[in-house]
Amino acid sequence: MMVLAQVQSLSVVIFFIFVAFVLGLSFYLGRRAKSAKGYFAAGGEIPYAVNGIAFAGDYLSAASFLGICGMIATVGYDGYLYSIGYLAGWIVALFVVAEPMKRLGKYTFADALDAKFNSKGIQLAAAISTLIVSICYLIPQMVGAGALVKPLLGLDHAWGVIMVGSIVIFIVATAGMASTTWVQFLKGGLLIIFSTVIAIMVCHRGLDTKPDQGGTVPYYEYKTLTAQNGTSPLKLSEADAKDYQVLGQKTIGEGDKALTFVKLSQRVEVKKDENGVWIVPLKERVIHLETIGEALDRLVKSDTRETRVIDGEKYTVIELNGRKVLSLDEGNMDVIDGVKYYEEGGKIYIHITSWWKRSAGATENDVNLDETQWVTARPDGGTWINGEPQSEENQLLQVGSITELNGKTDAKSGPVGPFEFLAELSRKDTRIRTWKSANFEDGQDKVTVYYPVIKSGNQIMTPGQKFPLREGWIKKMDFASLMLALFFGTAALPHILIRYYTVRTPACARKSTIVAIAAIGFFYILTMYLGLGAMVNRVVNPASDNMSAPLLAKSFNSVLFAIISAIAFATVLGTVSGLIVAASGAVAHDIMDRFGNLKMNEKQKVTAGKLAAFTVGLVAIILGIVFKGMNVSYLVGWAFAVAASANLPAILMLLFWKKTTAGGIVASIIVGIIVAVGWILLSPQMFERYGKLASDAPLPFSSPGIVAIPASFITLVIVSLLTQKKTAAAKA
């Protein structure tokens, strides 16, 4: 507990030092951002090298640092495919978009599209697209912020989202793009440096079948019980039957994908520690029972039904089936948060309900029951974890480990090189314990079970774990659709596009893109080591993989954890700032000034932009709370899909097809938005979010790019051809 407090204190200090610096920078630069160009585009005076690293800072957001590392930590190489897709998109940005966007634009994405037309329709459609893409991208950043605050500051998810939203609104409202650029430059550089440090430390620690986080957390060996097949209820082995009793089982799914979980009553002895405090040894955790210690002492000694008030509660010791049982409030058996404590043979025990995954045993007559972790949401609103009420001490255990290294169950490699690290993990005789989850109802309780799945190293390092392309055309379409969105979406993201207006010339725009590609590419190589390092060092939270990289840093030392957590928080701050600047520019410059024809002066544009930033920030805070727990890299895929569908067809056709018309661009943007967003809302993953079955969704897969991008291109071509005469007449 003392170590945890020191870690959190250090994290708080580092975090607030960084925030104080950012706020001071915002105050300083805010005095220089009086014009619209200064506010929305940093005056166009940012050096290309600084802008390139700021590009990287913008792009290496919560999705890249938290989401991709978390996805690699849970599914292996397939998570790295996001890195490949994200990086490949910069090729389009470099060779197609960079210089033309700088030549055509002024402040916003809509400026470039409308440079040749002066069309009210383009101004409005492009602004709406900017807002929707920005909000889609804001959601995962805020979710990432919420995930960070628990280990960093000890606050709940919602408070983390509110904190980030408030700080960012202040940053954007004071200095706009200038502050955002320098924050991103600082954060991007620090993120790459310290991620390199962690990757080196991962290789130096090497691989171990009993990872103990550098000796700080004892290794916990998950149990496997044996039972006799064909009996109802299952008959446990004689050794296991002493401490476990079968209560029932639950099967979910059908056929080969069916999962069966067996419900057991597990007897756990309550003991005293070296300080004389009663404790519950629960897996590798210890639950302290200071507040009811006097009652437990009395349970051992008392032979009568006398009643005493302890800590404001009335306790009674009663005889029940030959056992002395601690009872609350005159015989109520749901005692002390629902846990019944009883004495037997001078020792105190409790019974904990536990869930075990059923699997095939060594023979047809045997059944294995593999130990799991579980969370129970009770109808009274309480949450129980692994059979005890949720508390600061009782949380889900971190998971992820090697069970066999080169075929050996008790092995340690020692320091390894970067190539040897990957080679050892890729071996067929290396086996890794990964974790999956299943949800079901047990009476009125809602249960989530996290169960282990053992996979060979070559499975983990081969595509097909998250994207099982051999399972039919739907899986292939979903994967192809995602890759299309990632490849084409980068060059159409509003907060990326507006950064081309912060440099002096089109040549500087190209150079800054090259710097960005180098920095981002190097970082994505590091994500492989961070993600796999988390996978095998038992630092992954099975309920949310977003914190895998910071928790990996924590497994080395508290200082590194504090620094990397503060940088991760800064990652969210910087990216959210850029997104809100893009969104505020769309509102103030595109909608109010140009489309609304309000003819605002420079000061009024800046004021309108600040008000828009405040509004968009509030929306981002609300959505960040709503989407708690979802993988941030997956959520970012939405933004890429919408950007690729709504924005990129218009950009490419404007640059390379002379027959493109204003009507074609407007129709293309609208169709891209409707198809992409509509597809996402009706997708299998969103149906699960609605509390329904994924199979009930009307659409077969979740990524809309393979449908929405062609639809947008086709719409632009058809509408442009139909409006050629009108365009020619207007020019005449």
Image (spheres, rainbow, N blue to C red):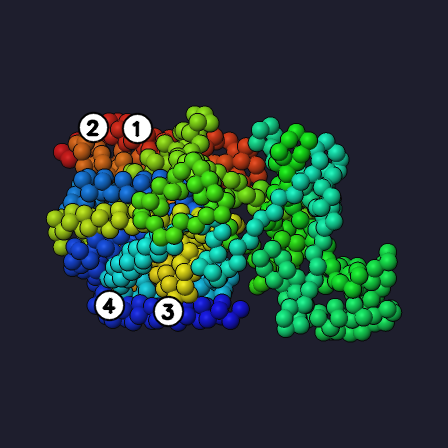
Q: Amino acid at mark 1?
A: Ile
Residue picked out by circle 2? 725
Label 1 vs 4, first from the N-terminus? 4
From the viewer's perspective, is residue 221 above or below residue 29?
above
Residue picked out by circle 4? 29
**Mark 3 vs mark 1, CA separation in Å:** 52 Å
Label 4 vs 2, first from the N-terminus? 4
Q: Amino acid at mark 2?
A: Lys
Label 3: which secondary element:
helix
Outermost residue toward the top? 473
Toward the viewer: 676 or 252? 252
Residue picked out by circle 3? 14
Label 4: which secondary element:
helix
User: Residue 361's x, y, as percent?
Assistant: 63, 34
> Does residue 48 appear left or right of residue 207 in this picture?
left
Residue picked out by circle 1? 714
- Residue drawn at x 49%, y 47% is 410
Label 1 vs 2, first from the N-terminus? 1
Determine the image quadrant of residue 705: top left
Residues under numbered marks 4 and 3 in contact, where contact means CB atoms less than 8 Å apart: no
Q: Residues within 10 Å of mark 1 (few under 14, many from 20)?
A: some
Please name which of the two marks, 1 or 4, marks the residue nearer to the observer.
4
**Mark 1 vs mark 4, CA separation in Å:** 45 Å
- Residue drawn at x 41%, y 60% is 556
Toward the viewer: 656 or 249? 249
Label 3 vs 1, first from the N-terminus? 3
Please name which of the two marks, 3 or 1, marks the residue nearer to the observer.
3
From the viewer's perspective, is residue 543 above or below residue 340?
above
User: Residue 254's x, y, as percent?
Assistant: 61, 30
